[in-house]
Image: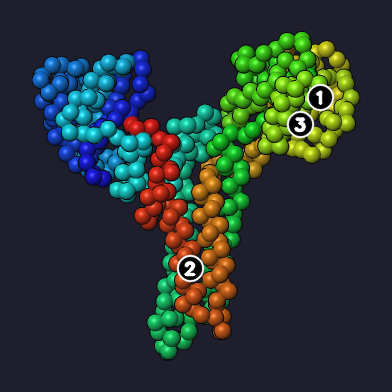
Amino acid sequence: MLSDPIAALATPPGRSALAVVRVSGAGAFEVAAAVIEGFRAAPPRVAALATFRLADGEPIDRGLYTVFPAPHSYTGEDLVELSCHGGLFAPARLLAALHAAGARPAARGEFTRRAVLNGKLDLVQAEAVGDLIDAVAPAQARAALYQLEGGLSRRLAELRDSLIDAQALLSYEIDFPDEDDGPVPPERIALTIAGVRERIARLVATAPSAERLREGALLVLAGRPNAGKSSLFNALLGADRALVTEVPGTTRDAIEAHTDFLGWPVRLADTAGLWDSPDRIERLGIEVSQRYLSAADLVLLCVEAGRELGPDETAIVAEGPALVVRTKADLATPAGEGLGVSVVTGEGLGELRGAAAARVFADRMSLGDLEPALTRERHRTALLGAQSALAESLSHLGPDGDPILTAHHLHQATAALDEMLGAVDVEEVLDRVFAGFCVGK
């Protein structure tokens, strides 16, 4: 049953000061009352101290509980949050008691799924909940919070309203073609459709940079063996993740790690040195490096300070996008073309972070990360579908056109927006969105 009571841990399992357990659904208060001594549903949204007990009366823990009556809760249902001591034992016993009292274990993302189905969030906002949880950099968190607060949803609602207005005009034309007011001028409808198409195009244009912001830009450290790539990788991370030796070819496989450059999320990859190695295993590592180069949002080409770029390195810069990084800048003056850095003195590391972030997030920096943007492929696919339907609708306007076909394609475009927002029954889409959530969310 969609509204049956569910329970799950809302905080990460393991040793901690506190753990929070959620119960939601029809009958949530009855389930909670079976576990919470002296349970009261009023006053709402006020924490109360109580003892939590098993069915036989044995105490589990003493903690706080807060009641959220429907519809004024996260899920839109009756909901109770119980706070107990952290660790593994007390939360597990509390959950077991709630399950024994009639609540079933929640599925992944089921609390947020119910929030969508009960109209507390739309699907775009629900995705933003997951993005906010997964954020590892300030820019990601700001963008996710803006989307959670309805920034993109409001823009989509405006587009939808414009399409509904156009459909209303067409309905008048179809149902009352011989009214004294005369036919609705096709130019009026075409102008509305063209305006929506233009606004959709602007949103679609945000997709590459916004998806990069959500996932983290891939920055690949590349160069010849012993060019200082692994040392720079460790310095940029602030931790020793890659093995560093004086032996060329030490790195034989790619190592990837998440970090942020001045608040912007990056996936930093250290790769095997690029050269014609006779070693079969090392050649396999070089093949991996080449794949990373092809996928990179920016290649940080590491070249020792004071050395001229070779033909292979010049080719990487020409194929781009690439930034020449002059490693070991403390050992040679001048460093040469590119940005000089030294992991020994720290010279240039801040400048490198800033320059790299500016290259890969230039669009987001110019637009501002608090502008509506398409952060997922699902968004882009839906809006491209709407664009296609709108183009078809325009082709049927005019004296020789068919207003019924125009209305049909406008309806298709509106349906694409509704699917993006989760305003229609799209179980498969919901399953995909919430598959990555934790059970307590």
Q: In which quadrant will I find the N terminus? A: top left
Query: Where does residue 381 sit, x and y in percent of width and height?
Result: 54, 53
- Residue type, mark 3 in image: Leu
The answer to which of marks 1 and 3 sits earlier in the sequence is: 1
Residue that mark 3 sits on: 323
User: N-terminal of the two: label 2 or label 1?
Assistant: 1
* Residue annotated with mark 2: 410
Task: In the rendered view, tell whether residue 317 sits above or below residue 156.
Answer: above
Q: Residue at x 68, y 32 (%)?
A: 292
Q: Which of the two discs, 2 and 1, sits closer to the camera? A: 1
Q: Locate residue 37 relative to residue 231 in the image: left or right.
A: left
Residue drawn at (58%, 31%), measured in percent from left and top?
265
Q: Is residue 342 above or below residue 419?
A: above
**Residue at x 47% of width, y 58% of height:** 416
Instruction: Find numbered disc 1 in the image and state the secondary structure of the residue it sits on.
Output: loop
Amino acid type of disc 2?
Answer: Leu
